[in-house]
Amino acid sequence: MKWLTDSWYRPQLTRFLLLPFSLTYQLVIACRVLAYRTGLFSSQKLGVPVIVIGNITVGGTGKTPVVIWLAKQLIQAGFKPGIISRGYGGKAQSYPHLVESDSDARVVGDEPVIISQHTNCPMAVSPIRAEAGQLLIDQYDCNIIISDDGLQHYALERDIEIAVVDGIRFFGNHYCLPAGPLREPLSRLRRVDFVILNGGPKESHYKMLLQAGAVINLADTNKTKILADFHDQAVHCVAGIGHPERFFSYLTSHELIVETHDFADHHDFSATDLSFDDDKPIIMTEKDAVKCRAFANDKMWYIPVEASISGELEKHILTKLVGSKPHG
């Protein structure tokens, strides 16, 4: 489907051919939103505040680092957050399903494992997010819930909405699916409480910068390097994320000689995917690394990232929590 996603961000005739389907999709979305607003479809309210972190485009925008960042801010403020997710790509036998730091990404999804590892917060995945949230409230006495993704999951009422925008690709051709990358029209951003811009040259009140940590060996996590150790060295760069070019460009900018290998977002890696006929190091994202632990070798490395967000967003979120009313 690469031809389709390419048409979203580059001038191609395909977008015009798909435009009638996009208009139909947009009409369905509008009717669905109206159904929730009028009570035709019901939304479930949890007994604690709910913060949803999502986006309005298909593909990765950097939600996971924001979830981790927010969980840490709330813990510092005295909250006991629980985190819920759809668990995209996971194949649990039953839901809601609790997530631990050593959970199998093939069962619960790749991003939930990363979130659990970095926050140590109670976490659960379920297609019905309210059930996951209620489980955390009942079993762990969580007093606030963070939803990883779910901006379009109106079956769960929320007190605060945060949208994350890719500061490099933005909204492509501004069309809704399938002619463009938008899950909802751009006007949706006017209804969220906060918009975070992930990188890029454009300035924003709330701008996120992703700071890379040490390069960690996947077979032995006690073994670390810095990117400078790979300068002028040929490496295999592997990424199964929503916007792999961002990761590739990052390594190239640090003077690595990169041979790129891009896979579909949430790709279920196997050992053969990373069987290259040479001894070059293999560098991947942390999201990919959690799915490669079972067949890791000493050539495999990954780079974790940490978010920093400008504009004193944490203070504004805490202020909003005091007087917020749930979104319908």
Image: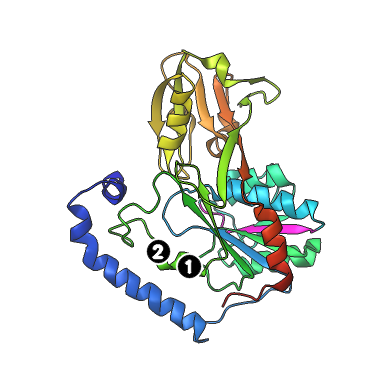
**Residue where numbered disc 2 is placed:** 186
Please give the name of the residue rendered at 72% of the width and 61% of the height, measured from the top-left corner.
Answer: 318
| Vertical placement of residue 52 versus 325, above or below | above
Residue 44 or 62: which is nearer the viewer? 62
In the picture, the quarter occupied by the C terminus is bottom right
| Vertical placement of residue 120 versus 182, above or below | above
**Can you see residue 146?**
yes
Residue 81 is a magenta residue: yes
| Vertical placement of residue 251 versus 239, above or below | above
Left or right: residue 58 versus residue 96 is: left
Element carrying mark 2: helix
Residue 322 or 227: which is nearer the viewer? 322
**Residue where numbered disc 1 is placed:** 190
Q: Position of residue 240 (x, y in %)?
A: 45, 39
Mark 2 to mark 1 CA distance (whole Å): 8 Å
Residue 9 is a magenta residue: no
Disc 2 crowd, CA 10 A, few/some/many (<14, 14-19, 20+): some
Please give the name of the residue rendered at 47% of the width and 15% of the height, measured from the top-left corner.
Answer: 280
Element carrying mark 1: helix
Q: Position of residue 6 (x, y in %)?
A: 29, 45
The amino acid sitting under disc 1 is Arg
Please give the name of the residue rendered at 34% of the width and 70% of the height, measured from the top-left corner.
Answer: 26
Q: Position of residue 76 (x, y in %)?
A: 79, 51
Left or right: residue 319 versus residue 175 is: right
**Can you see residue 184?**
no
Q: Position of residue 267 (x, y in %)?
A: 45, 42
Residue 167 or 269: which is nearer the viewer? 167
The amino acid sitting under disc 2 is Leu
| Vertical placement of residue 286 versus 207, above or below | above
Give the number of marks.
Answer: 2
The residue segment tinted magenta is: 79-88
